[in-house]
């Protein structure tokens, strides 16, 4: 066993500690003997002495010199001046029992070196503290508050301070990483425990949860979900979440406080609303001008509309605030509602509902052709209808009895509800359509997001997408476009009554097979969505097909459209944006028009009215209706009306639809003969699937920054294609739109003669 250690720059604290540990007993025993011919030097003297002191000086001088050299060595191993000062204090305060003053045993020296090693590890762990690059690589080290980071940091130092290992060994990089991860894991375990407390409360694991609290039964499911979301967010985002113990009683109290507040807001607002309509206090409904035509049904709509707009979290509405809201709604209603519409009272609405037949949904039997087309898996013979039948009780409880009626051009009555939200970003209504026998049929109408026209879908659902809306017969979706007279009144209603949300529970429906993670795909239908899709046939458009002239319906109105598109689509995607092959593309687009004799007379405007469009047209638009002469096409007499819409924001014009006014109107409310308008019917903001190949997005093209689909709409499409499925009626693939879509559609329009002529004719109404 060596009796000394040679000091060099590479001598480590671990080397010194090992020497001290090995010689502490022998040196302590020798140093305390009464008679020795040559006193044995204590461990720190043996280690710390310099060569010139080996045979010089008294034992005390040698002790002092060795002591100074040892302290100098230890301090040289530490980088932090505070640590150097602290280790010097420890060094000076330690001495062994029964030895001369200023001396120490190997055991005490080992303790001092252990403290120095601990300080060295404290310095090394600083490279892993919150805010460092190393910290960001640790599992779970993200989304932390300052207090949580501080706690983790303190835990790192605490682990070093209390662990024997970190007093004996200077930690390497891997050990430092493990220690830092241990501190993060300690916090995560405490945070998980707090989350378990929250989850157990809301799941009712340790009691009744929310359902046992006062006010729970008064609130809607969405309000309850909002309370849970708000409480969770408040707790989990707290600065010290996971650091202080969270008890079930604390969660319960916070939920109770929220429920009490919402309950009070709801009760107070409901009282004020009832007082307003019962003419108790002031202001009240009897004092409001312009309400002579408001029957009980419209009053119910006003109440529902106020409650739909009411943000229960923002506080109760006073009677004065309610009066202001209703005054605005009445003014909007009276300012836009058409005189062609009859406002139905409760008795008239009831008579219509009682005389209405509704869809009795059937499971869909997969046909042999479906299997050939591979629309469904080969082992699937029947698809279960995912929505329930609706009845008069559903209509009454959802306040979706008809509010208005009009006489269609076939002399039959069309009655409609107010507009409501089918899903976020999608507006629809229920329509009661009178048939030949005088009995009504219930159907759903919806507003196109890209072209702004109202449609009556033939059915809903396809093999993968529950909310797909049937496009009727033939190419495009022209066969489901409602007559211009109905378009006008539907837009008048929409301008008068912004869509409301239908109160009621949402429904989770498994549909469309498996996702990429092999989980069942799910669709959430709001109560409004359930009512809307419940009015439509599932997967089967045979009822629609039986009521249209299939010899003519859906045929292209553009002569030789197929060959024109073939010639255009042979060019590469994005060529227009890259300015490639422009002249050749323009030559083909110049051929895109309607046949001679079917053109609209742009010198004779039939009518003009404001339209409410989707959020992609935030300032709305205006419809311009033109008509052509009567002509014969394929042995069929036709007289076409054209509906062009001008976007108020940009002044851009597009063709929303055409109508053959000589065709009959069927029980879906649409003409039984129509043309497919093809690329003439391209909205200003359009889906990629609707554009010819050269006009589609190319990632190599710099984005123009012009308006495209909003982030919300893009998110809807990316998370399941709902927007695309309802409006474009195309498959979900390739449905996203880039921000320069508007520019590319603009280039498409300006090279199609009919659209350019319409733009010029409509522009004359806006010239100074």
Image: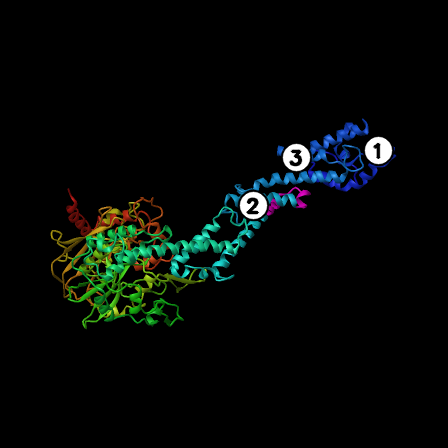
If the image is split into quadrants, where does the C terminus sit?
Answer: top left
| Image: 135 above or below 384 | above
Rendered location of residue 517, percent (x, y): 45, 60
Q: In the image, is 308 to the left or to the right of 125?
A: left
Horizontal and vertical percent for residue 69? 72, 31
In this rendering, the count of numbered labels is 3
Residue 25, quarter of the rendered image: top right
Q: Secondary structure at mark 1?
A: loop
Earlier-in-chain disc, 1 versus 3? 1
Residue 152 got which mark? 2
Tell me which numbered mark, 2 or 1, is placed earlier along the sequence. 1
- Where does the N terminus fall, quadrant-wise? top right
Residue range corresponding to the magenta coloring: 163-180
The answer to whether 398 appears left or right of 255 in the picture is: left
Of callouts 3 and 2, which one flags the residue occurring earlier in the amino acid sequence? Answer: 3
Please tell me whether mark 3 sits on a helix, a strand or a loop: helix
Residue at image mark 3: 86
User: Can residue 606 be seen?
Assistant: yes
Q: Which of the two discs, 2 and 1, sits closer to the camera?
A: 2
Mark number displayed over residue 39: 1
> Which residue is painted at 58% across and 50% down in the image?
186
For the residue labelled by badge 2, is the local secondary structure a helix, a strand or a loop? Answer: helix
Question: Comparing marks 1 and 3, which lies closer to the viewer?
Answer: 3
């Amino acid at each position: 066993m060596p009796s000394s250690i040679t000091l060099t720059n590479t001598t480590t604290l671990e080397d010194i500690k090992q020497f001290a540990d090995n010689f502490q007993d022998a040196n302590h025993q020798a140093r305390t003997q009464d008679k020795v011919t040559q006193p044995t030097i204590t461990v720190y003297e043996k280690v710390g002495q310099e060569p010139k002191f080996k045979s010089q000086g008294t034992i005390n001088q040698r002790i002092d010199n060795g002591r100074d050299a040892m302290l100098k060595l230890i301090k040289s191993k530490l980088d932090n001046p505070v640590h150097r000062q602290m280790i010097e204090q420890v060094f000076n305060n330690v001495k062994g029992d029964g030895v001369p003053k200023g001396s120490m045993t190997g055991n005490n020296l080992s303790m001092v070196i252990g403290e120095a090693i601990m300080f060295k590890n404290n310095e090394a762990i600083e490279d892993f503290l919150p805010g460092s690059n190393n910290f960001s690589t640790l599992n779970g080290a993200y989304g932390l508050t300052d207090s949580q980071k501080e706690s983790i940091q303190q835990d790192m130092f605490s682990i070093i301070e209390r662990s024997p290992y970190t007093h004996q060994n200077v930690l390497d990089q891997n050990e430092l990483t493990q220690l830092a991860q241990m501190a993060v894991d300690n916090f995560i375990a405490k945070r998980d425990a707090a989350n378990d407390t929250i989850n157990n409360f809301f799941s009712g694991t340790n009691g009744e949860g929310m359902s046992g609290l006062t006010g729970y039964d008064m609130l809607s499911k969405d309000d309850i979900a909002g309370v849970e979301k708000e409480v969770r967010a408040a707790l989990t985002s707290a600065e010290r979440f996971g650091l202080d113990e969270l008890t079930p009683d604390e969660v319960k109290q916070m939920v109770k406080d929220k429920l009490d507040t919402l309950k009070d807001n709801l009760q107070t607002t409901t009282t004020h609303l009832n007082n307003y309509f019962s003419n108790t206090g002031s202001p009240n409904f009897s004092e409001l001008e312009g309400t002579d035509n408001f029957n009980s049904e419209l009053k119910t709509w006003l109440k529902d509309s106020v409650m739909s707009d009411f943000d229960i979290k923002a506080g109760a509405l006073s009677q004065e605030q309610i009066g202001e809201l209703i005054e605005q709604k009445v003014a909007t209603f009276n300012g836009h509602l058409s005189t062609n519409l009859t406002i139905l009272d409760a008795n008239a609405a009831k008579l219509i509902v009682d005389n209405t037949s509704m869809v009795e949904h059937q499971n869909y039997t997969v046909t042999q052709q479906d299997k050939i087309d591979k629309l469904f898996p080969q082992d699937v013979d029947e698809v279960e209808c995912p929505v329930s039948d609706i009845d008069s009780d559903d209509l009454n409880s959802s306040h979706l009895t008809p509010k208005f009626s009009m006489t269609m051009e076939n002399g039959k009555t069309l009655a409609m509800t107010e507009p409501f939200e089918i899903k976020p970003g999608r507006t629809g209504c229920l329509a009661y359509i009178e048939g030949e026998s005088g009995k009504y049929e219930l159907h759903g109408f919806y507003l196109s997001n890209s072209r702004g026209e109202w449609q009556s879908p033939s059915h809903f659902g396809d093999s993968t997408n529950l909310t797909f809306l049937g496009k009727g017969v033939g190419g495009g979706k022209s066969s489901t476009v409602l007559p211009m007279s109905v378009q006008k009144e539907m837009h008048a209603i929409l301008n008068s009554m912004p869509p409301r949300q239908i109160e009621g529970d949402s429904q989770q429906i498994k549909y469309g097979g498996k996702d990429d993670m092999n989980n069942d795909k799910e669709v959430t239908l709001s109560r409004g969505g359930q009512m809307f899709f419940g009015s439509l046939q599932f997967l089967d458009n045979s009822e629609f097909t039986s009521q249209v002239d299939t010899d003519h319906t859906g045929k292209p109105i553009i002569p030789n459209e197929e060959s024109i598109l073939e010639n255009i689509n042979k060019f590469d995607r994005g060529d227009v944006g890259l300015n490639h092959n422009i002249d050749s593309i323009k030559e083909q687009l110049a051929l895109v028009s309607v046949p001679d004799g079917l053109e609209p007379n742009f010198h004779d405007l039939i009518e003009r009215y404001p339209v409410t469009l989707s959020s992609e047209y935030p300032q709305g638009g205006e419809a311009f209706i033109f008509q052509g002469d009567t002509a014969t096409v394929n042995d069929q007499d036709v007289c076409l009306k054209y509906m062009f819409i001008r976007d108020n924001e940009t002044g851009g014009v597009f063709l929303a639809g055409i109508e053959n006014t000589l065709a009959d109107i069927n029980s879906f409310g649409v003409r039984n003969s129509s043309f497919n308008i093809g690329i003439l019917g391209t909205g200003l903001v359009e889906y990629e699937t609707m554009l010819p190949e050269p006009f589609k997005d190319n990632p190599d093209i710099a984005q123009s920054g012009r308006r495209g689909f909003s982030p919300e709409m893009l998110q809807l499409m990316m998370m399941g294609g709902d927007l695309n499925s309802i409006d474009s009626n195309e498959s979900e693939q390739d449905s996203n739109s880039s921000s320069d879509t508007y520019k590319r559609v603009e280039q498409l329009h300006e090279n199609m003669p009919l659209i350019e002529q319409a733009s010029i004719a409509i522009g004359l109404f806006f010239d100074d």
